[in-house]
Amino acid sequence: MPEAQVIHLDEARPGRSVATRRTAAPAPRGRKAAFERCQAITASGNLCRNRALANGFCTVHRPPPPRERIGPFDSEDVRRALDLARRRLLGQYEVDEFGFDPEFTEKVVLPLVRPFHRRYWRVDWLGLSNVPAKGAALLVSNHAGTVPVDALVMKFGLLDVHPAHRHVRLLAADLAFRMPFVGPMARRMGNTLACSEDALRLLRAGELVGVFPEGYKGVGKGWKNRYHLQRFGRGGFVEVALRAGVPIIPVGIVGSEEIYPMIADLKPLAQLFGFPYFPITPTFPLLGPLGLIPLPSKWIIEFGEPIHTEEYGPEAADDPMLVFDLTDRIRDQVQQMLYRNLMKRRSTFF
Amino acid sequence: MGQRVMITGISRHLSAKLAQRLEGDPAIEYLIGVDTEEPEYDLERTEFVRADIKNPLILKVMETAEVDTLVHLNVIATPTRVGGRSAMKEINVMGSLQLLAAAHKSDRLRKVVVKSTTAIYGATARDPAVFAESMAMESAPVTGYAKDSVEVEQAARDFGRRRKDVVTTILRFANFMGSEIETPLTRYFSLPVVPTAMGYDPRIQFVHEDDAVEVLRRATVEDHPGIYNVAADGVLLLSQAIRICGKFALPVALPLAAPLAGVMRRIGLVDFPRDQLQFLVYGRVADNARMKHRFGFHPAYTTREALEEFVAGQRFQRFVTPERAERWQQDVYDYLRRKARREAEV
């Protein structure tokens, strides 16, 4: 076994006193080095070829002084965080006409959501290359899980793991925007009302739009119907895609069904609160607030082959037969993806 | 022969500013301002006529002055100054109907400009994020200023249909903002602590008063038939706007918002019309693309710049200024460093 090249990740961060090798710098070509080399970069800009001491640097180059730390944090990170806080306090940030605040979404919400899709639900991402790095596209996904967490996982997952770190602009029901705290938060994260005007506006601006045609019928379906796609609305999303001439990307989300298994729906209570359904799960409301903790199921999110709508032309949006046909095709594709990925998953939780 | 222009509501800020702009234009031969109150602004060659637009005599005034352009700005948003909601409705709706009826009879007339508002789009959670001109009237507001404006617009459109020879322009203005104009909204932002609806953060959009006057001027001297949203580029969140003003928000539970507004009205703090409270819950943004492309007007101020110009007018105390915020940031940073060092020594 050849000896592995040891590269000290910690000292290779920006802001160093001595210029050091980039973390991902390839090992010197040719004969494998029998010893570790110094991490410094010489004045002429080349990698230092001297033998490294125990600290990773040679006798000529001294290691950079340890960065100042404030408690457990790097002082530079603390300064950046305070800078952000100051600008927010002064209102020095931009929102678009939908109320989307990218800075807030990336710097405040994403770090909070990241552990969920990475560690808690351990999402496997398939077909990421089907999501374009730029330009408009319509993501059409199944919807499940009693609480529309799947939408947020898809949104923040793409922002986090997609090479282009794209924001998905989700289309949500008006209930979301009527609710205090939830509504403004939904807008701040770039989502808007599910209506053709907003969808068209976003697509024409070259945004990635996410839509869940099953709506409440999908999120609020009982446990016995899990992974059975509901009706895909009246195909309004297909009309919008045709009109804007953007590709439709089917998305299959496996795992969201098990986070809050809904075994019953208390309709009278739902009517009382004006909600579309009132869920009873094995833990809610039995365990009180503890019942709000979602189950750690294993997730697989797959992006299918894009369906190109440009060839039909915008007039095709007024052809109901074509719209129904495309709607059925997409629904079928999503259903196939779900079955395929369910087979792939070893068990619900692993 | 030059243009002969009549402006209604000349005692009001926007009308007077428009008159001042038009006075400098040699193509305007004659300017006449109509109102029931005397204007407080310096007007040089604008002739002031004390007349009530609700009175059919207004036709006589138009005929004698040989008016060919009518700019109708006498649509008011707040009921308190005129003595109650019914008086306000009387002025707004009946006044406009009478005025347009008189205009219908006037043979010389060849242009009518009517001021409206984006408030006619309403503000609910079920509306699209951005209103285009074609989207109005689907959920027409049923109260107050917005309802009046819907009716005024309806009358103006009926007029336009009957008098096809007259160029009819309807301008839907976003909320005015600037260092001189005074509206319920500018007074709201001048409050020491700004009450907001708890759990809501609406998107808001302004139009700077100078831009508004310029659009009115161009609608008066040029021909732009049709309906246009007049709004600045860019959007602010209410919380953001309050911070730009250097203030703190006071979130109020929604059921208490209307009573609070009532109290503030009674003690003369802010006369914020009850029907406009919805705006502070869901907000409203209008699409200004038609104004830019068809009208050909590009606003000089963005929404943020309009607000900043208002803030620079220094009409109120600011608690958070950029300088102070910078100092606070340094203080917090120094404190954290000192603390960390002390702990390291122990």
Image: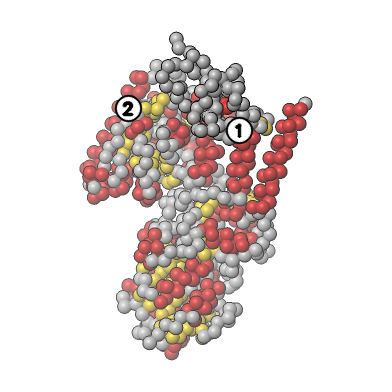
Residue beneath the point at 52% across and 53% down:
B236
Crowdedness near tag 2: few (<14), some (14–19) or many (≥20) residues, C-alpha within 10 Å: many
Q: Which residue, given by chain and number where applicable, does mark 1 sit on?
A: A17
Q: Which residue, given by chain and number where applicable, does mark 2 sit on?
A: A337
For numbered disc 1, what is the local secondary structure?
A: loop
Residue beneath the point at 27% across and 37% down:
A307
Please identify the quadrant where the C terminus of chain B is shown: top right
Residue beneath the point at 34% across and 41% down:
A137
How many numbered discs, if any?
Answer: 2
Question: Identity of the amino acid at label 2?
Answer: Met
- B280 to B9, vertically: above or below: above
Image marks 1 and 2: residues in contact by CB distance under 8 Å:
no
Q: Position of residue B53 (x, y in %)?
A: 48, 80
For numbered disc 2, what is the local secondary structure?
A: helix
Please identify the quadrant where the N terminus of chain B is shown: bottom left
Whether callout 1 and callout 2 share a subunit is answered: yes
